[in-house]
Image (spheres, grey):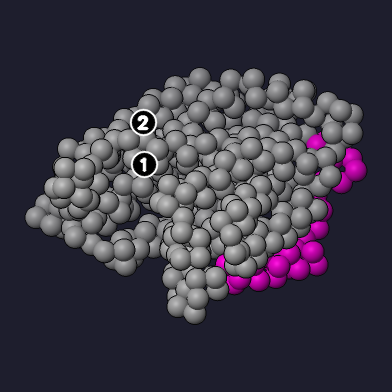
Amino acid sequence: MKRSPLVVIFTTVFIDLVGFGIVIPVLPFYAEGTRFNATPRTVGLLFASYSVMQLIFAPVLGRLSDKYGRRPVLLVSIIGTGIGFLILGFATTLWMLFAGRILDGITGGNISTAQAYIADITTKEERAKGMGLIGAAFGLGFVFGPAIGGILSRWGVAVPFLFAAVLCFANAVLLYFTLPETVTRDHPARVSAAGGRGFAQLIKSLKDPRLGFVLTIYFLFIVAFSIMTTSFSLFTMFRFGYDAQHTGYLFAYVGILAVIIQGGLIGHLVKRFGELPLVIVGALLFAGSLFAVPFVGPEKGGLLALLIGGGLFSIGNSLSAPSLTSLASKTAGRSEQGSVLGVTQSVASLARAVGPALAAFMIHSAIAYRGADGETHFMSDHSLFVTFWAGSAIMCLALALAVYFARAHSADYSDGGVAEPA
């Protein structure tokens, strides 16, 4: 009974991320085409509108899932995402593109509901393993999504969006017929919502210093990871002369490692070591790799060193992300799982907006662009070092917080979980 719902939840998140990945290579070309004539800044706003909507609505969907159940919220959100893709595919004006992305962002906040569902059907000892499925779905979605988008765009730039819509509607049918509800009438989340105490309990939960530490560390991890993903393509282009195809292979390699760790190994590792040691080791690996990678080049380590650095990126993040989500879930009581995990996803959305913005600020000169003086400029080694080392410094801060948190609160999690809040 536990295995089948997890398969459906995995499929739901995977399809969400495939749809998101499909958009990455296609939307800029689609929006800047002759039909819409969008500027690069407008394309940036299109991407930002999705993240901003997720930031706002992830906790809303999480709270609604506490009140009305996980199944209806997941079902409505998947259908909404499918409609958003249809709007993109059939768009004739720029405002329709924004409408599609905004709707997709609102309903795409359902990952917190999927995480709450996992929290409902797993024990605290198995929580990190269940959350690792979400990370594995992320990794696979980012491996397959951009590739599918690029291939389908050969038949027209609208085709990938229509394909993503079909995936969403097929997923909705699967969920409707196979996914049982976990928030029963006597479930603490529904009882809390019915009594009108849900928001007060959520505020009380967020004031818990343990949860505050977990969310802060999680935020720093994703900011650093976003800096890396934003800068890595520029780095490989500038230092190695790679094109988008070869850099795509590297990202696929990073995604496959994430799938292996989060989809298969994380449960065994948490059982043996616990979440907090994995967060610390992950932060250490991530900080070290961000510091070292700028030294890599064709004459200094070559492709092998680049693969090692990219692998350490992935391993560090894959050890820590599901462990932190598991800790956030354990810190919250059963009555506010959806709400707190929704806030966790909002923190992630905010971090994914902050990271690229910081990277753009630090990479103060772009690759081979023509400046106002008419001269061609190139990205400097100084920009590379500053950007990656800023990410490393952020991870060092996360590492320090994780070590302090482990020393102060490791006893709270030594039995597989913490006491339920009153």
Q: Is residue 42 visible?
A: yes
Question: Which residue is found at the position 42% from the left and 52% from the top?
Answer: 39
Q: Secondary structure at mark 2?
A: helix
Pinpoint residue 76: horizontal percent, then vertical percent: 76, 55
Instruction: Decide: few, some or many residues near mark 1? Use Cα within 10 Å; few <14, some 14-19, many ≥20.
Output: many
* In front of the other: 89 or 147: 89
Q: How many marks?
A: 2
Question: Which residue is found at the position 51% from the left and 20% from the top?
Answer: 408
Q: Is residue 273 visible?
A: no
The main secondary structure of the magenta stretch is helix
Precedes in sequence: disc 1 or disc 2: 1
Q: Which numbered marker is on residue 394?
A: 2
Which image quadrant for residue 334? top right
Instruction: Decide: few, some or many residues near mark 2? Use Cα within 10 Å; few <14, some 14-19, many ≥20.
Output: many
Query: Does the segment drawn in magenta span residue 186?
Result: yes
Relative placement, left or right, of 411 versus 245 is right
Question: Which residue is found at the position 46% from the left and 52% from the top?
Answer: 43
For marks 1 and 2, give the CA distance. Answer: 10 Å
Which image quadrant for residue 325? top right
Question: Which residue is found at the position 54% from the left and 31% from the top?
Answer: 215
Task: Look at discs 1 and 2 and give the one toward the viewer.
Answer: 1
Pinpoint residue 244: horizontal percent, then vertical percent: 31, 63
Which stretch did the figure color magenta?
161-189
Q: Is residue 215 above or below residue 31?
A: above
Q: Which residue is mark 1?
A: 227
Pinpoint residue 177: horizontal percent, then vertical percent: 80, 67
Q: Which numbered marker is on residue 29?
A: none
- Quadrant location of the C terminus in the rendered image: top right
